[in-house]
Image (cartoon, helix red, strand yellow):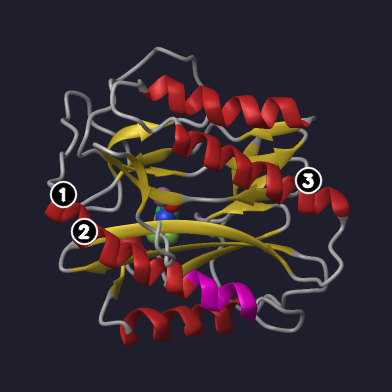
């Protein structure tokens, strides 16, 4: 999954961005359905089945299924799981923090997004804050996704929100990415960085921004299933992601199902 050097950023026309928006809407609709399905007692396999129906029902193809052998339609990462949790027998419990990552393809164009949902009507304030901080950092990164800015402006905007919020860790082993005719494309999009540094952002670039934030230490490891990434100290983590186009009129969230 490495990013090759000297690769060029795939630049999209406005028409191609509209096609990506169609894939993005399938992802957004699927995540919206899943967000209300995350209730105590449901298994992650049931969530995966819901996603499968939503995506195929919309005439789209799930991008994760079969990706490097990945066996499911979504990733479900609960509590200390950060990303790439595989749906299965695990039951969602009251108060769990469930991060759901979803990708779909329409006419060869990809959308990729993730949300974090707390399975409770009365969430733990510290867990709600973890998710809110992560979501706010994503929003700040999106605001910085403007032509003429540099990649470091996105990373530093994300990082600033998280650092200001308290004792949180920014996972560095995984980053956002370019997206278009493939899910993972050049360039990498780190969730940290220095303003004014790195690749210049241009109209027509489409990036998946995806901060992964932990309570405390950002150190992670991969479980023996070769997919599930967990925090080393067992503290909980949140993940939020959007696919974002850099346009003449500023950043546009493609994985959205509301008019902008
Ligand atoms: N969508 C994830 C990301 O945000 C990658 C999922 S890997 C898969 O980049 F194998 F699960 F598909
Ligand atoms: Co992604």
Report x, y in % for residue 66.
32, 67
Q: Quadrant of residue 26?
A: bottom left
What's the mark number on residue 26? none
Residue 32 within the segment the image draws in magenta:
yes
Q: Which residue is at a point 61% across and 47% down the rendered structure image?
A: 135
Q: Residues within 10 Å of mark 1 (few under 14, many from 20)?
A: some
Q: Residues under labels 3 and 1: Cα distance? A: 42 Å
- Mark closest to the chain's N terminus, 2 or 3: 2
The quarter of the image holding the C terminus is bottom left
- Residue ID for mark 3: 235
Q: Are marks 2 and 1 in contact (CB under 8 Å)?
A: yes
Mark 3 vs 1, N-terminal side: 1
Front residue of 20 and 228 = 20
Using a 10 Å C-alpha cutoff, classify the residue at mark 3 as few (fewer than 14 neighbours), some (14 to 19) or many (20 or more): some
Q: Position of residue 7 (x, y in %)?
A: 17, 30
Label number found at residue 14: 1
Residue range of the region highlighted in magenta in the rendering: 31-37
Image position, residue 153 (x, y; %)? 44, 22
Which is nearer the eye, 243 or 247? 247
Residue at disc 2, CB closer than 8 Å to ligand 2: no
Q: How many marks?
A: 3
Q: Main secondary structure of the magenta part?
A: helix
| Quarter the N terminus occupies | top left
């Amino acid at each position: 999954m490495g990013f090759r050097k000297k690769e060029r950023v795939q630049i999209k026309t406005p028409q191609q961005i509209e096609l990506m928006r169609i894939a993005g809407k399938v992802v957004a609709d699927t995540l919206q359905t899943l967000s209300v399905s995350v209730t105590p007692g449901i298994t992650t396999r049931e969530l995966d089945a819901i996603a499968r129906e939503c995506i195929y029902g919309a005439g789209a193809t799930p991008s994760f299924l079969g990706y490097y052998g990945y066996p499911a339609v979504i990733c479900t990462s609960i509590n200390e799981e950060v990303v790439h949790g595989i749906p299965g027998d695990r039951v969602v419990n009251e108060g769990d923090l469930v991060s759901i990552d979803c990708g779909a393809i329409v006419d060869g164009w990809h959308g990729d997004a993730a949300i974090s949902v707390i399975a409770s009507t009365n969430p733990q304030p510290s867990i709600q804050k973890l998710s809110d901080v992560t979501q706010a950092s994503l929003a700040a990164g999106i605001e910085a996704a403007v032509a003429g800015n540099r990649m470091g402006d996105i990373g530093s905007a994300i990082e600033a929100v998280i650092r200001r919020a308290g004792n949180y860790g920014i996972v560095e082993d995984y980053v956002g990415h370019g997206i278009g005719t493939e899910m993972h494309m050049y360039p990498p999009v780190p969730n940290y960085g220095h303003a004014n540094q790195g690749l210049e952002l241009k109209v027509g670039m489409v990036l998946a921004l995806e901060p992964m934030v932990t309570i405390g230490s950002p150190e992670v490891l991969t479980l023996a299933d070769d997919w599930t990434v967990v925090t080393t100290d067992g503290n909980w983590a949140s993940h939020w992601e959007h696919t974002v186009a850099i346009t003449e009129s500023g950043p546009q969230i493609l994985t959205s199902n509301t008019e902008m």
